[in-house]
């Protein structure tokens, strides 16, 4: 009888110990366990890289192509003041990168740096854009060459083109003794309004050389509506402008 009583106490005690350990373990799990996220700097969940791929919006480096810089140019606005721009091609149909850091360096004819100016550019999905800065002061020195370089790697995220319903209409370019101007018509082909955007333009001559560029900002376009984006330059290009490319980018 004594032996059975001892066994029963051991069984009860063991069961109670298991229950207590289970409760304590559950409480520790609840308090200490952190579900995988896309911002914890750990490769977990269904990620294919640290905080990228899988269900994360951020794309892993192996999932995107690097942006391509096609040209870099500068244009005088006034004595001692210039705009600078670089044309960026995005080869990723569903990838966007925001606030990508870069810098421009303007050099004189002797190869000496005049000014080094930083900036940030948003690269939209399936669209090309300009990294644009201006006006850039250079004092009494005259730029001869412009250099552009990304100073940080883009963080790519999955995104769709929010301007897919936008179409470019007329591009009315005129020149006179006071300079040149351009009026671009943009149309929204959807009943849903389009939000604010930056609109860049690049002017080319018969040899595809860049002879001008600029930027303007639009507040948005109503559903099935249209707006006109104006651009002006103090320079008359004497009929050199043959091609006009319009590059709208959503804010």
Image (cartoon, rainbow, N blue to C red):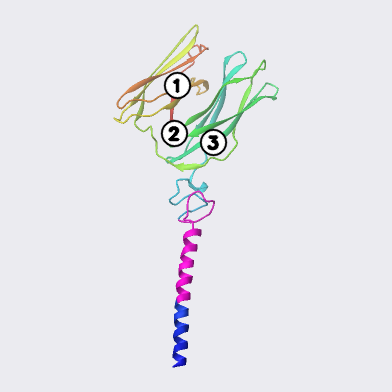
Quarter assignment of residue 244: top left
- Does dot 3 land on a helix, a strand or a loop? strand
Q: Position of residue 86 (x, y in %)?
A: 54, 28
User: 111 and 82: which one is in front?
Assistant: 82
- Using the image, tell me which numbered label, if any, was put on residue 100: 3
| Distance in Å between CA atoms under marks 3 and 2 | 15 Å
Counting residues from the N terminus, which is met first, the one under dot 1 or under dot 3?
3
Residue at (52, 42) in percent of width and height:
155
Q: In this view, which residue lies farthest toward the bottom? A: 1
- Using the image, tell me which numbered label, if any, was put on residue 127: 2
User: Is residue 173 found inside the magenta-colored segment of the image?
Assistant: no
71 left or right, relative to 190: right
Which portion, as a residue range, is magenta?
A: 16-45
Quadrant that contains the C terminus? top left
Counting residues from the N terminus, which is met first, the one under dot 1 or under dot 2?
2
Quarter assignment of residue 73: top right
Q: In this view, which residue lies farthest toward the top? A: 177
Q: In this view, does 242 lie above or below 176?
A: below
User: 27 and 123: which one is in front?
Assistant: 27
- Does dot 1 land on a helix, a strand or a loop? strand
- Does dot 2 land on a helix, a strand or a loop? loop
User: 55 and 178: which one is in front?
Assistant: 55
| Distance in Å between CA atoms under marks 1 and 3 | 28 Å
- Using the image, tell me which numbered label, if any, was put on residue 243: 1
């Amino acid at each position: 009888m004594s032996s059975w009583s001892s066994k029963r106490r051991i069984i009860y005690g063991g069961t109670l110990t298991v229950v207590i350990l289970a409760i304590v373990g559950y409480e520790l799990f609840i308090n200490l366990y952190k579900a995988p996220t896309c911002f914890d700097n750990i490769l977990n969940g269904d990620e294919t890289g640290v905080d990228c791929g899988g269900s994360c919006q951020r794309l892993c480096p192996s999932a995107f192509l690097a942006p391509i810089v096609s040209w870099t140019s500068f244009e005088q606005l006034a004595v001692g003041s210039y705009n600078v721009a670089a044309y960026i091609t995005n080869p990723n149909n569903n990838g966007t990168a925001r606030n990508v850091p870069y810098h421009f360096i303007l050099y004189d004819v002797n190869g000496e740096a005049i000014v080094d100016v930083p900036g940030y550019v948003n690269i939209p999905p399936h669209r090309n854009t300009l990294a644009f800065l201006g006006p850039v002061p250079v004092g009494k020195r005259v730029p001869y060459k412009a250099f552009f370089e990304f100073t940080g790697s883009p963080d790519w995220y999955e995104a769709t083109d929010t301007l897919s319903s936008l179409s470019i209409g007329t591009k009315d370019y005129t020149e006179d003794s006071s300079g040149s101007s351009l009026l671009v018509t943009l149309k929204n082909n959807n009943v849903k309004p389009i939000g604010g955007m930056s609109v860049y333009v690049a002017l080319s001559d018969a040899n595809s050389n860049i002879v001008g560029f600029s930027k303007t900002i639009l507040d948005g376009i109503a559903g099935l509506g249209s707006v006109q984006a104006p651009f002006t330059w103090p320079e008359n290009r004497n009929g050199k402008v043959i091609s006009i490319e319009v590059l709208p980018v959503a804010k």
